[in-house]
Amino acid sequence: MLMDANTQIRVLLAQKKSSITKLAALIANRTGKNCSKQNLSNKLRKGTIRYDEMLVIADILGFEIKFEGKK
């Protein structure tokens, strides 16, 4: 079963014992762009987060996104 981005990010945050607030601060620090907790939560909830933003989030959390062929 596929999870949406919101669920995936929240599961990863729980595994890393972190929060949306901390993640938003790290994104802002990494990109130099404003990223509030509310803005990030809204993007995840609405499903409007961009792929490049997901790459930054994955990197911050210590993961990489990669595509694999189906078996």
Image (cartoon, rainbow, N blue to C red):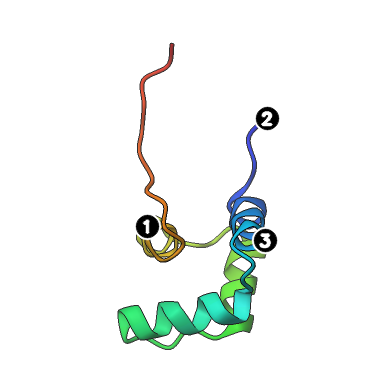
Query: Label 3 is placed on what type of residue?
Result: Ala
What is the x, y in percent for residue 52?
A: 35, 60
**Dot in front, 3 or 1:** 3
Secondary element at image label 2: loop
Q: Which residue is mark 2?
A: 1
Q: Secondary structure at mark 1?
A: helix
- Identify which residue, 63 or 52, lies in the foreground: 63
Q: Residue at x 39, y 55 (%)?
A: 51
Amino acid type at image mark 1: Leu
Q: Amino acid at mark 2?
A: Met
Q: Earlier in the sequence, mark 2 or mark 1?
A: 2
Say if mark 3 contacts mark 2, CB within 8 Å: no
Q: Position of residue 46 (x, y in %)?
A: 64, 62
Q: CA distance from mark 2 to mark 1?
A: 21 Å
Q: Quadrant of the N terminus?
A: top right
Q: Is residue 13 above or below residue 8?
A: below
Is 6 located above or below residue 23 in the figure? above
CA neighbours of label 3 inside 10 A, class few (<14), some (14 to 19), many (20+): few
Q: Residue at x 46, y 62 (%)?
A: 61
Kindly identify the residue that appears in the image at 64 percent across and 72 percent down: 42
In the rendered image, residue 66, in percent from the top left (x then y), is placed at 35, 39
Left or right of 49 on screen, residue 17: right
Residue labelled with disc 1: 55
Image-quadrant location for residue 60: bottom left
Mark 3 → mark 2, Cα distance in angstroms: 19 Å
> Between residues 50 and 13, which one lies in front from this camera angle?
13
User: Which of disc 1 and disc 3 is earlier in sequence?
Assistant: 3
- The residue tagged 3 is 14
**Which of the labelled discs sits on residue 37, or is there none?**
none
